[in-house]
Every structure is written in structure tokens, then in C-alpha cells.
Amino acid sequence: MIRLITSLLLIGAIAGFAAFVAEKGGRLAVDWDGLRVETGAPVAIVLLLLALLLLFVLYVVLRWIFAAPNSLRRRSFERRQAEGYRQFSRGMIALAAGDARAAAAAATGVDKLLPQSRLSLLLTAQAAQLSGDDAAAHQRFTRMLEHKDTELLGLRGLLVQAQKAGQVDEVRRLALRAVSVRADAPWALLTLIEAEATARNWPGAQDAVERALKAHALPVSDGNGKLAAILIERARESEADPATARRFAESALKLSPGHPAAAVTLAAILRRLGKLRRARGVLQAAWSAAPHPDLTAAWAKEDVPKERRVSHMADLVGRVWSDDPAARLAMAEAALAAGDNVRARAELDALPEQGPTALVLRAELDRLQYGDHDGLRDLAARRVLAPPEPVWLCAACVTPTLLWHALCPACGRFDTLKWEKPRPVVLPSPPSILALAAPQ
């Protein structure tokens, strides 16, 4: 609408100007080298306008002629670029579909159409990985390190290869470089935490966790749990310096109040420092927060007379969580050690399930009370059939262990031990197990 109004106004202005010139009339004469040209003013103005129009057209034509090569090159480049991006899209789709051959072919096309782009490096590296050509993938990822915009991607590819090959030192080196390139990259920070912990470089692992928390690469609860695990190990390795070990253990317990290993470690350090009352308070506070067999085992290490073992254990488990299975088992074991067989049997009978530990205590109790050696003889078979008890179970390799460590003793992964029951195992029928367990 605006263009139409503008055109009408322009036509009206031209028509008004023409009418004005025609009304005024007049003549125009030009003398040049003996030649005289004379014409009316309206005609002269029209001729002048035509000359200007002709010059403008000539200018446009010449400009197009001189600009044609660049325009053709630009259009050719745009076509090649568009086709290159189409080839890249096809290659990514092929990668997603698991077609390494099609991805490699697309990468070749991208390399020809977009020689200055790094997209072909990414495509060929991923295609090589998919086809199992680790050497080619390593070469492409290494070339990515030469450019700032692909350096982080190349580092991640090389890091994944190093992890698969079990190259611990190389993983740590690449993770450190990745963090230096981008300090808030979550995958780099998490990999650096694992690498430092695996190398038992606890100060480095602690620094990596703190950086991850600052970059919001870890939830606060997870980060505090990892920091607690690191500080427990630092406390254990600082036995020669009890004051430093105590500081680490207290920090770990503050970060994770329900962590039994933190409480047990701190209690052991306080005992070495002669602070028995403080050590008892730590274990009692930890038991009140979350009952755990490791706490009762640490409490039972204190040297007390035989006749006081039951009352001594009751000081820990008799206040809160007295009905917890860990409390029942601890009291039964203390009563058995003190010779109170009636109390021991009462605690075992009150258990909701007769797990392997309860069966061992019950077999020993039967032997002491009734001279029943058959219970001990059949104990192995009955323990196999008993419901599993919670253990420290690795979330990565599902290997159980009795003692907590920051690193899984089986696979070496960091902060993967969780207190839970093992997964059920498919076993032969009970009669066949009993037959195998029976004495020959």
C-alpha cells in the first residue's frame, strides 16, 4: 500500500513538472564548434532525462559485468556449503543409525565440499569409532586439538578412548587439560574427580569436587558425600599426625552426619588421643542418626570387663533404635560373650529375619547350651538359604564388601559403595544344597 501511494505521488510530481515546463515554454540553443543546435525547452529537458537514464543503465550493466565473477564464485560457494551441510546431516543420521560406512562416505563428501570446516573431522572421528578403527579416531580427535572451537570436543573423544584402554594417567592428563579449557564443563570435572580419586590423590580429588560444586556440575548432596569420602581417606592416611587426622574426620562427619565410616574413623582417632568420652559421644550421636553394624562393632572394641559387656552395648543401642536388627544382633553377641545365653536367645528370637549372622550366633548358642554340634555342621547350607543381610555393595560392579572404602576394592571406582542388601541370586533347590552341604 505504501509503495502504491509512493508511486502515485512520484507520477503526479513528474506530470506536474512536465505541465509546468510546457506552460513556461522557451527555447534552448547550443553552439559548439560552428554547430548550432536549437530546440524547445520541454524537448531539451526530456532529452536530458533520457541521457541520464541511459548513463544509469550503462553504469548498471558495467557494474554487473565486473561483479559477475565474484557473484558466480559466491553462488558456487553457497551451493557447495549447502550441499556440505546436507552431507553432514546425512552423516549424523547415519551415525545415529549405526551405519559407519554411510557416515564415512558422508564425511568424505563434507571434506571435499567444506575443506576449511572442522565438521568432517567430527564426522570421520565418530565414524571411525563406530567402525572400531581406534587409530583413525585418535588421529581425527588429535587434529581437533589444533583449533579452539573443536579442542574441547577432541579432548572428550581422546578421553573416552583412554578410559576404554584403561590409561589412568592419560585420563587424568586429558581431564586436567579439558578443565583448563573450560572450567565449568561437567563431564570434565566429574572425570577429573574419578581420575584423582583412583590415583589416591585425595587433595586433588577434593579440589576437583569443590570446583564441580562451584560450577554446579554436582548436586550439593552428592558433592558433600564425595567430599566426606575423600576426607575419611585423608584422615586414615594421616595416622602419624592425629591432630590433622582428627580435623579431616570431623569435617567428614560434619558433611555427612549419617556416614558410619566417618564416625568410626573419628572415634578411633579420639581413642588414640585418649579422649574416650568424646569417642563414645561420636558413636552414640551417629547411632542416633542412623543405626549401623559398623558402629556397634566399633563400640565393642572398647575393652570392658566380661560382666559389663551387655550393659556397655546397651549404652549405645538401648536408647534409640533398640528394635533395629543391628541392635538385636549386637546385644545377642554381647550377651553370648558375657555368658548370658538366655538374653542372647531372646534377642535372636526377636529378630524379624534370621539372616546369616543370626544363624551363626544361634548355632554357637545351641552348641554352648545343648552341646548341639549338628547346627554347626549344617550351618553352611542354612546360611546359603538365609535371607541376605545388608553389606557394602558397589553400585558399579555389584561386588559386596564388609568394610567401607572410598574406592571399591574390586573395580576401583570412587564413592560407589552403598549399604544395601545384595541382589537375589538364582540357586538350586534347597534339597540339593542340603545334600551338597551334608558331611560325607
Image (cartoon, rainbow, N blue to C red):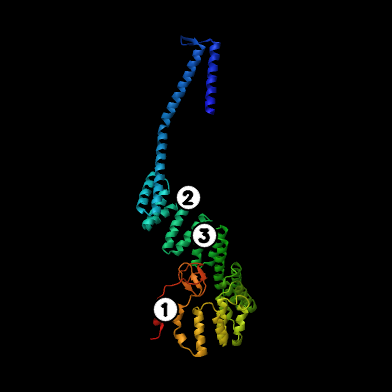
Q: Which tag, 3 or 1, sits closer to the chain's start?
A: 3
Q: Quadrant of the C terminus?
A: bottom left
In percent of width and height, residue 140 lies at 40, 53
| Position above or below: 159 against 360 | above
Secondary structure beneath dot 2 equals: helix
Marks 3 and 2 in Cβ contact (< 8 Å) = no
For residue 163, above or below residue 289: above
Give the residue type that dot 3 points to: Leu
Asked if 375 appears above or below 195 in the picture, the reply is below
Closer to the camera: disc 2 or disc 1?
Answer: 1
Q: Which residue is at a point 37% across and 46% down the rendered structure image? A: 109
Dot label at residue 430: 1
Kind of residue at disc 2: Asp
> What residue would you read off at disc 2?
149
Where residue 67 sits, quadrant-wise, is: top left
State if disc 1 and disc 3 touch (CB < 8 Å).
no
